[in-house]
Image (spheres, grey):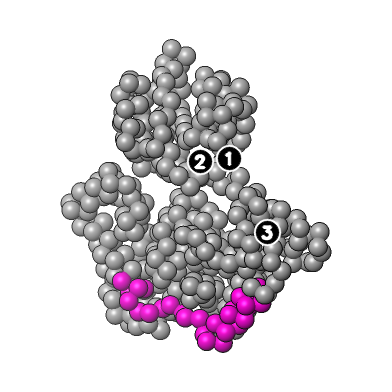
């Protein structure tokens, strides 16, 4: 399982705790093995992440319906204070960043985790999340703005 | 491009996902605009912070063991389970599983069919998104020409096929240019036509099907989308022009 860490990282960020993340990954792997015998091919990572993502969303809808609130794709909010946000982000430690990322809506968190932590391309994210590339672009922009604004409000932490 | 356009594109630029022409336009703007440059710095700080702070969770050893066990159990299963199921042969395997009984097989079939359904909608989604992006970002054309003999050679060397390029100015659908786009998992030719005040994007890529098919009209978010095959090519037409005019246009392109 060369992509187990990537699978676990996505599940962990979506589910929010170790126990549920492990359950989701295990369930997803059962499906993955049944699906094609094993995970191979050049797109194996995106393929496995897609199964993990769908398993996680199904699990969340069943066990934590309030967490799965679909986001509306309205206009981008402005960043309230770009310089303040930049300074505040610069000084943030790992714990603060973790909490900020965890506070984002599910679809935004997913896009950022895939992009920044797993280094996925827009096309791969589109495949995993099942949305067009244009939606990936706007979700990443809005996810980052929400984080910037979180930090701008915190000021010099 | 003004600041509002830049703010829409700056994230894709920071992610290195913009085409060369638009990247250069963004960079040009950033040189002369301190506000947008501050936005870029802020995004860069955020990206660095997320990547350098080790926010990644690694799979615990206990899970690793469980998955290894699962993999072994899978390898010990019936021989046909282990076959490297090719996409084409996979349906058969699922059907076999369903006949063999078992709720998981049913669950998997449901997943497979869901994937297939979303696959169909995804082409429409992608085509509309490409159409909208091409208008939004002032990136309708890489080669602007009403001359089919200019547009066609432009594609040579950029694609592994030669798209049919015809001008229909006499029928009220003048060719105005072309560009490369990405659709349905491959690079495609995008031909841009105009009908009255509407722009029409025609995405063309080779199809395994040599026969012409009847155009299928769909509507999505106020756009009309027509798909059909002709002369060994798949055509996907997207526009906000009315469906009737687009159907006529599909006929000109060779749809039945």
Q: Which residues are magenta?
A: B48-74
CB of mark 3 within 8 Å of CB of mark 1? no
Q: Is residue A54 visible?
A: no
**CA–CA distance in space, label 2 to label 1:** 8 Å
- Residue at 62% x, 58% y is B85
Q: Nearer the viewer, mark 2 or mark 3?
A: 3
Where is residue A110? Give x, y as percent. Answer: 49, 66
Where is residue A129? Give x, y as percent. Answer: 53, 59
Identify the element where label 1 is drawn.
strand
A19 and B116: which is toward the camera: B116
Compared across the picture, whether B65 is left or right of B1 comes to: right
Farthest front residue? B79
- Residue at 23% x, 59% y is B37
Chain of the residue under the numbered disc 1 shown in the image: B
- Residue at 48% x, 76% y is A5
Residue identified by numbered label 3: B111
CB of mark 2 within 8 Å of CB of mark 1? yes
Identify the element where label 2 is drawn.
helix
> Residue B220, labelled with which disc?
1
Chain of the residue under the numbered disc 3 shown in the image: B
The chief SS type of the magenta part is: helix
């Amino acid at each position: 399982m060369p992509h187990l860490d990537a699978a676990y990282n996505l599940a962990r960020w979506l589910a929010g705790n170790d126990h549920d993340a492990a359950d989701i990954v295990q369930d997803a792997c059962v499906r993955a093995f049944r699906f094609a015998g094993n995970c191979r091919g050049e797109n194996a990572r995106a393929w496995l992440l897609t199964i993990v993502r769908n398993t996680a969303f199904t699990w969340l809808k069943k066990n934590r319906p309030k967490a799965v609130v679909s986001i509306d794709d309205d206009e981008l909010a402005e960043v309230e204070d770009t310089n303040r946000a930049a300074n505040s982000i610069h000084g943030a430690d790992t714990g603060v960043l973790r909490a900020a990322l965890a506070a984002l809506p599910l679809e935004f968190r997913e896009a950022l985790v895939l992009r920044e932590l797993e280094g996925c391309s827009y096309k791969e994210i589109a495949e995993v999340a099942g949305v067009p590339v244009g939606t990936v672009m706007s979700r990443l922009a809005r996810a980052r703005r929400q984080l910037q604004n979180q930090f701008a409000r915190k000021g010099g932490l | 491009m003004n600041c509002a356009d830049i703010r829409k594109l700056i994230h894709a630029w920071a992610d290195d996902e913009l085409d060369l022409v638009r990247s250069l336009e963004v960079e040009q703007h950033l040189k002369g605009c301190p506000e947008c440059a501050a936005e870029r710095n802020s995004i860069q700080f955020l990206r660095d912070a997320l990547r350098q702070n080790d926010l990644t969770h690694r799979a615990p050893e206990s899970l690793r063991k469980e998955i290894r066990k699962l993999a072994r159990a899978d390898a010990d299963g019936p021989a046909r389970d282990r076959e490297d199921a090719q996409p084409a042969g996979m349906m058969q395997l699922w059907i076999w599983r369903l006949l063999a009984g078992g709720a998981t097989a049913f669950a998997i079939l449901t997943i497979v069919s869901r994937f297939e359904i979303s696959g169909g909608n995804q082409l429409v989604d992608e085509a509309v998104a490409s159409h909208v992006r091409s208008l939004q970002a002032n990136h309708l054309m890489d080669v602007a020409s009403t001359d089919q003999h200019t547009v066609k050679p432009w594609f040579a060397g950029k694609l592994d096929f030669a798209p049919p390029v015809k001008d229909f100015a006499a029928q009220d659908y003048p060719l105005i240019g072309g560009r490369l786009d990405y659709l349905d998992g491959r690079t495609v030719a995008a031909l841009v036509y105009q009908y009255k005040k509407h722009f029409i994007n025609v995405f063309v890529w080779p199809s395994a099907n040599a026969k012409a098919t009847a155009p299928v009209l769909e509507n999505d978010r106020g756009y009309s989308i027509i798909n059909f095959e002709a002369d060994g090519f798949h055509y996907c037409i997207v526009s906000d022009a009315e469906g009737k005019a687009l159907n006529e246009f599909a006929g000109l392109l060779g749809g039945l």
